[in-house]
Amino acid sequence: MNYFVYILRSQKDGSYYIGHTQDLDFRVERHNQGKVNYTKGKRPWDLVHFEEYPDRSRAMAREEEIKKRKSKKFIDSLVGTSRQS
């Protein structure tokens, strides 16, 4: 089963959240229901970018790569090229 790296943008303050999952729709729903402690204070969230990977290890590596950049400009560039934006 494939895994997804996803980027959410808070409608409240425009901040981003980056994660990975097997079930993209379910995970976004959990964020918006306040079931994820880290993100519940900035709801609602919009899915603005995702990438699909064949296994969890590749998805986790990509998630870490994005997070290590620590660059809003880099994330904005990913979001800008996404079909979801």
Image (cartoon, rainbow, N blue to C red):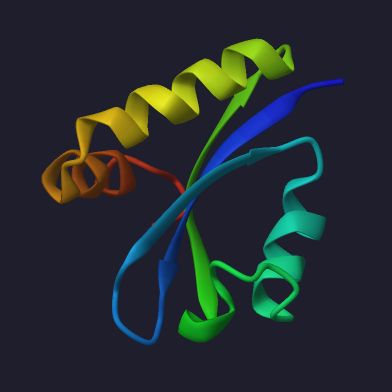
- In this rendering, would 24 be left or right of 60? right
- In this rendering, would 2 be left or right of 31? right
Above or below 71: residue 15: below
Instruction: Tell me what residue is drawn at x 29 percent, y 39 percent.
Output: 78
**Residue 40 place in picture, x, y as percent:** 59, 79
Instruction: Tell me what residue is drawn at x 68 percent, y 62 percent.
Output: 28
Q: Nearer the viewer, residue 84 or 14?
A: 14
| The image quarter in which residue 77 lies | top left
Q: Residue furthest front?
A: 37
Instruction: Tell me what residue is drawn at x 21 percent, y 49 percent.
Output: 76
- In this rendering, would 14 be left or right of 53? left
Above or below 2: residue 43: below
Above or below 60: residue 44: below
Instruction: Tell me what residue is drawn at x 62 percent, y 26 percent.
Output: 52
Q: Nearer the viewer, residue 41 or 44?
A: 41
**Residue 66 place in picture, x, y as percent:** 34, 31
Q: Residue furthest right?
A: 1
**Residue 18 place in picture, x, y as percent:** 47, 47
Looking at the figure, which quarter contains the N terminus?
Answer: top right
Above or below 44: residue 45: above
